[in-house]
Amino acid sequence: MTVRWWMRYWALPRVMSARSLLACAAAALAVASPAGSAPSLVLIGEVKGVIDPPTASYIRRCVRMAEERQAPLILRMDTPGGSLSATEDIVTDMLNASAPIIVYVAPAGAHAMSAGTFIAQAAHIAAMAPGTNIGAATPVFLGDQPASQEMKRKAISHGASMIRAIAEKRKRNVKWAENAVRNATSASSSEAVKERVIDLVAEDDADLLQKLDGRRVEVRKGETVTLKTRGAKTEEVEMTVGERFLHAVAHPEIAYILLSVGVIGIIAELYHPGVIFPGVTGVMCLLLAFYSLSVLSVNFVGVALILLGLGLLVADLFLTSHGVLTVGGIIAFVVGSIMLTSGAEPEMRVAWHVIAAMTTVVAGFFLLIVTLGLRAQRLKVATGAEGLIGSVGEVRSVLDPRGSVFVAGELWRARAEGEAIQPDEEVIVTGVEGLTLKVKRRQEV
């Protein structure tokens, strides 16, 4: 039995069988995990500023995209709070999402206050960067009217029960969450992770992806998903142009400026009818201002005072008040501006420098109108008989005292003041009585 025969009939067939088995095993593994070699995908959204309907629409779109692409969604958040109705919509979408949602309060210095606390608690995983804070979720009521105490109590009770249910579902600190609503409790990132308000603290996005890897989260219908975020590919989901515009408009200072500019534009159109541009601009600004005010928590007594102040300034253009209406209008405008957001969080108030700037603009605008009006009253009349006053004419028939004069290319009846004036002498028109001119000899004037 030779070596050639041994290789041909015994050793070679066994080597080929082993190779076939290895190839089959590799094929089976490839079929079992077709995306095993491809990096996983993580979607990242940005929630910054006031929580409003455009923000709710944007987050809903992000959640739907994450569900369609079967990818976890990270919402990087920095918000002072916002609309309760928009917050409820966001929380509902997050609690019923079939894709893992991670809320990450970042960067350092960011916060998740008021509505942001509800959103963070509703996430499958809540994370914060060092130097951030969360809490103070008590509903804000502007104006502090005594008659609204019962409504305040009901709203606080509703908010407490809502966040308690969210914290229970996500297995977080229920007591702390309720205190955030009832007592405006807040916590730093280190305190929040100790109190089980959040799940982890991450330095940045890369650190967050590392710490999320391997975590198991329970999504809708009891399904459990293991996160594979180490080395994952990230994709930013940005707001659309429409969402950005409406979100930018929904800010107290923008609403305040739009309201003031809108009223000024309409007044300018009424003062100069037919110009069109100021009127169209004013109506558009007012509509955007009313949209913004409907989204924000503002004191509508302040809105009424602002409108009253502008109305008094307008009234002073048509009534003789010797400046009383103007002073009253400016005072009402300033007081209304201060009251507009006086009870809101500091980040949601109209800044003093904005109030001062708009007051200066409004006062300057009306001062300009009054100045132009007074200047127009002093102008010499340029048409009709009164427009001839001060004109030089020539006597055609003796004025003793009545006769005729030639003025501005026309022959007029005239009456001389003083001595008789002979033909061809020059006279100056000093007044008008009906269709008769009063004149004087030019040398006498």
Image (spheres, rainbow, N blue to C red):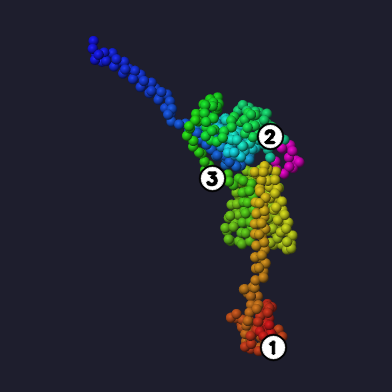
- Answer whether labels 2 and 1 touch (C-beta < 8 Å): no
Residue 34 sits above or below residue 412 on the image: above
Judging depth in this view, the residue of 100 and 131 nearest the camera is 131
Residues drawn in magenta? 141-152
Which residue, given by chain and number where applicable, does mark 2 sit on?
A: 185
Q: Secondary structure at mark 3?
A: helix
Q: Amino acid at mark 1?
A: Ala
Question: In x, y percent, where is residue 213?
Answer: 52, 28
Going from the N terminus, do you reach mark 2 or mark 3 first? 2
The residue drawn where x is 66% and y is 56% is 360
Q: Farthest front residue?
A: 3
Q: Secondary structure at mark 1?
A: loop
Q: Residues within 10 Å of mark 1 (few under 14, many from 20)?
A: some
The residue drawn where x is 59% and y is 47% is 249
Q: Amino acid at mark 3?
A: Gly
Q: Amino acid at mark 2?
A: Thr
The residue drawn where x is 73% and y is 56% is 328
Residue 9 sits above or below residue 121 on the image: above
Residue 333 sits above or below residue 382 on the image: above
Which residue, given by chain and number where applicable, does mark 1 sit on?
A: 420
Q: Secondary structure at mark 2?
A: loop
Horizontal side, residue 256 vs residue 99: left or right: right
Is residue 302 at least partly visible in the picture?
Answer: no
In the rendered image, residue 4 lying in the magenta stretch gets the answer no
Residue 242 has which mark? 3
Which quadrant of the rendered structure holds the C terminus? bottom right
Question: In x, y percent, where is residue 373?
Answer: 66, 65
In this rendering, the label closer to the viewer, 2 or 3: 2
In the rendered image, residue 149 lying in the magenta stretch gets the answer yes
Q: Farthest right residue?
A: 146
